[in-house]
Each structure stands twice: as structure tokens, then as C-alpha cells.
Amino acid sequence: MKFFSKKYDRTVVVEFYSDKTRKDDAIKENAKNLLSIHFKEENRLIYSSRLESYPDLSQLTSQSRLYLVGHGEKKKQKFSSCDVDMLVERLVDDCSLKAAKRITLIACHLGEMKEFIADLQLKLAEEGVYTEVAAYKSYLVVDHLGHRWVDLGEENGLVEAGKQKIVMGWHQGPEGTFPQQVVLVDTNEINPYYEDALDAGDDKDESAFFETAYDSQSNQEVIFTPESLPFPIGSEHSYSNTKLKMFSSSMDSETQDGDNASYQKRSYTPNFE
């Protein structure tokens, strides 16, 4: 698994909570699954206005990748209750975001709304942040090894997340002209026979993205080989047990505030070494 892929100088995962939420088990679990064996409770990066917790993203570069883990709903152009303007303000003003090669929204349905992704990309560019923006369609599933899948229901099956995805990018024209927004990826594959192919692969362009990791305790870079990884996904694993349907509008966030003792009000600065 890759921690920093060869395409990026660093990867940062941020749990992004709405203003109504102090704690969200689905967001935490998906962030934890993305990080897989590299997850550490003390290193969690959390955006929460209620906790006054704002990750410092100022050290991200134009070669960095940023994962925002949150919620979305079908036909609603909001990410964790933020519209485009609010999301840009929070990333730029609250988190000091200045650059990123790609921002990926780990959330359901947002990839179905191209206008939301395009508007987010454009508004970030107006703040000087020219970046690719990626999102997934329908229900997003993150398994315990960090692989991403999109659940299209019984009729169309479970597919690798890269097969239900949109990525907006920039095309630089002749010198002196402004970059133009372009669609880099827009996939819509289905898999009605997915039960026979659960262990056939993963989201090849983004899953298992941890290759090397920085061990802050030993000040050494850790390199992972296939032999050191957990047992791969196989037929004995039940995806019904690992699915995390990201958007549960029925979740009562206010009833989940009891475990806040570990979240002292503070700002987080990720370890970018």
C-alpha cells in the first residue's frame, strides 16, 4: 500500500465535519480506513468549527494530494453541509490552503453533480489555488484496507471507485492565456455480476495509495512491501460488513457529543516530512 505515491510529494487526509457535528463515526471510520495500518488516533486531522479545530494545510504544494472525508447527499450541492463558497472559505481562510495537485472528496453522490465540482475548482482558482478536483458517484464504500468502491445497488452492482468518478483539471493554452477547465475523467461503468468479482481488483488509480510513510517516532521513512501488508481481500471477507454508506441524513449528530473529551479545542499541524 502507498502512503505517498510517485505522483504526489505528500498525502493528507482531513475529517471534515459540518457545523452541526462534533463527532461522526462514519467520517472517522472512512478516514481511518483510508489510512489503513498508518492510522494513529493522535495524528488525526479534523476540521470542526464547533471544536475550533482547523488543520494547517499551508505546507501543501502543487504536487500534494488532499483527501477531504465528509458527507454529501443526492442532488444536493453541499459537502458536509458546506456550499461551494463556504467550503472554499474554510479551506483557504481557516486552513491556509495555498496549493494542491488534487483534492478528492471522499463522499457520496457529489461526482454526480459536475456543476458542483466545476464551481469548486473555479472558486479555488480565484483564490490562487489551481488544482484538480475529484469526486465519486452514488454511494461510496471504503473497506478496511483503504480500497474504494461505489455501490450502485442490486441492479448495477459494486464497482471499483475509479469506474464511477469525475475529475476536473486545467489545460494550459498558449502563453499569456488563462488555463481552461477540462474534464480529465468521467467514468460510468456498472457491474451487475459484482458478486463473482469482489476480489478481482480495486480502484487502480487511487486505492491502496500508501507506499512509504514517515515514522515520526523513529524519524525514518518506512517502506512497505507486499509481504508486510495485511492479508488481501478475498472471498471470505464480507463487504456487507465493511460498507460505509457515507451519507446518513437520519444520523443525530447532537446525540454523539459524549466522546468529546479527547478532542481538545486546538489547531492541528500535519507532519509533512
Image: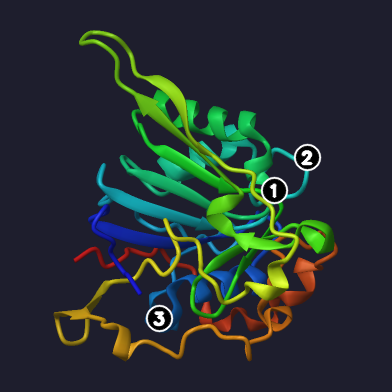
Across and down, in percent, residue 182 comes to: 45, 25
For the residue labelled by badge 1, is the local secondary structure a helix, a strand or a loop? Answer: loop
> Crowdedness of circle 3 by 10 Å Cα count: few (<14), some, many (20+)?
few
Residue at position x 44%, y 47% from top? Answer: 103
Residue 24 visible in rendering = no
Across and down, in percent, residue 78 comes to: 68, 42
Q: Sequence-wise, which precedes: disc 1 or disc 3?
A: 3
Q: Sequence-wise, which precedes: disc 1 or disc 2?
A: 2
Across and down, in percent, residue 184 comes to: 45, 34
Q: How many marks?
A: 3
Reading the image, the residue beneath label 1 is 109
Reading the image, the residue beneath label 2 is 75
Q: In screen coordinates, is 66 left or right of 112?
A: left
Label disc, if present, on residue 66 of the rendered structure: none
Q: Amino acid at mark 3?
A: Glu
Mark 2 vs mark 3, foreground winner is 2
Q: Split into 4 quadrants, where in the image is the N terminus?
A: bottom left
Q: Split into 4 quadrants, where in the image is the C terminus?
A: bottom left
| Mark-to-mark CA distance, 2 and 3 | 35 Å
Reading the image, the residue beneath label 3 is 42
To which quarter of the image does residue 116 belong?
top right
Q: Amino acid at mark 2?
A: Lys
For the residues labelled 1 and 2, say whether their Cβ atoms are less than 8 Å apart. yes
Q: Amino acid at mark 1?
A: His
Residue 152 visible in rendering = yes
